[in-house]
Image (cartoon, rainbow, N blue to C red):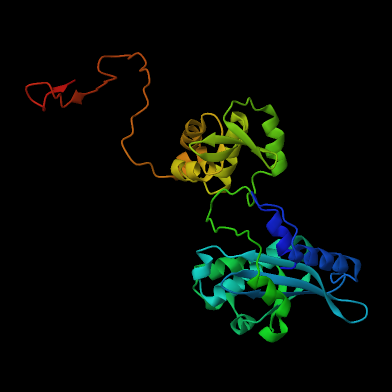
Amino acid sequence: ILLDPLHYLLRKNQEFIWSEKCNSSFEKLKKYLCSAPVLTIFNPEAPIHIFTDACIEGVGATMKQVQENGVLKPVFYFSRKLNKIQKTKKAIYIECLAIKEAILYWQYYVYGKKITIFTDHKPLGNFNIRNTNDKELLKIMNYISQFDFDIVYNPGKTNLGADCLSRNPVLESTEEKDEQFVIKTTNFLTIEDIKENQKFLTLDNKFEIKNDLVYKNLNKTNKIWITEEFGISLIKKVHKNKGHIGTKQLTLMIGHTFYFKNMYKHIRLICQSCDTCIKNKTRIGCFRAPLSQLGPAKEPFEIISLDSIGGFKNGKSTKNTCI
């Protein structure tokens, strides 16, 4: 809010006019930068307190720790805007989502440590994952349950920091995409793996570079471009780790984000030739017996071979059969 006049000047096609508001904002910024800091440095040995809040616009959280003088000071801030679907959810969902998003954002600081979470949504204080059949809440709580935490009810009037962050969230929002292969959340590749592989690409004129990644332009959509060999390896990893899913699901999952030569052909061949799928999946349709050469007979009528074909459309009768 303090820097809004300055941010406004950075917009595209915006005329640069240094107004009184800009000057006031700049002077206040200099004053705050030269004064005692509000934030303190994270202490791995000190207890971790996370204050969360949510509203219809977004979710926010503050991580605080008790200092040597006994004062509880903020260490980190976090906020995120809700997407259109999340804005329609009930209160307990977005309050629970605020906890999950805060832990996810600070997971490298809180993993393996005891956390105390303060929320102004009283039902979450006694929330038990076993007492709900809500699949969306179960999904959130299943993620949170891997951490060591206690949830404490904290009245809204004492939770001002997180409350302000939730009502003034950052502009970015994350879409809930079930089982989609999103680059930020994948467990199969890292950004470094992709960048290293893209060094071996033979580029044409239909590409662009964003955030140091090469994207292929396809029908007004951009997809991360990788080599054919790297793509085959990716197909095998995703197919195996996602429970040996079929051709259609695998195509949607990988094709949503990545492009490489002969992608659909390789997906089909890998799914059809997978030993685990062949042994365990029920095949639908007619099966042809494998052709094999018969050995010589030692006596008459020892081996009899029979084959037939019928239903000739151009014949006088469709019942004709040739043996």
Residue 119, above or below 34: below
- Residue reaching furthest to the right: 68
Report how many numbered discs are placed on residues in the image.
0
Q: Is residue 112 visible?
A: no
The answer to whether residue 172 is left or right of residue 293 is right
Q: Residue at x 77, y 71 (%)?
A: 63
Specify the quadrant of the image occupied by residue 319. Answer: top left
Q: Residue at x 64, y 64 (%)?
A: 80
The one nearer the camera, 244 or 201, is 201
Specify the quadrant of the image occupied by residue 171. Answer: bottom right
The answer to whether residue 82 is left or right of residue 154 is left
The answer to whether residue 272 is left or right of residue 216 is left
Specify the quadrant of the image occupied by residue 118. Answer: bottom right
The one nearer the camera, 20 or 298, is 20
Horizontal and vertical percent for residue 71? 87, 81
Horizontal and vertical percent for residue 62? 74, 72
Q: Is residue 129 visible?
A: yes
Residue 61, above or below 294: below
Q: Residue at x 52, y 44 (%)?
A: 256
The answer to whether residue 292 is left or right of residue 82 is left
The one nearer the camera, 269 or 34, is 34
Horizontal and vertical percent for residue 35? 90, 70
Residue 95, above or below 293: below
Name the quarter where the N terminus is drawn: bottom right
Name the quarter where the C terminus is drawn: top left
Horizontal and vertical percent for residue 248? 44, 43
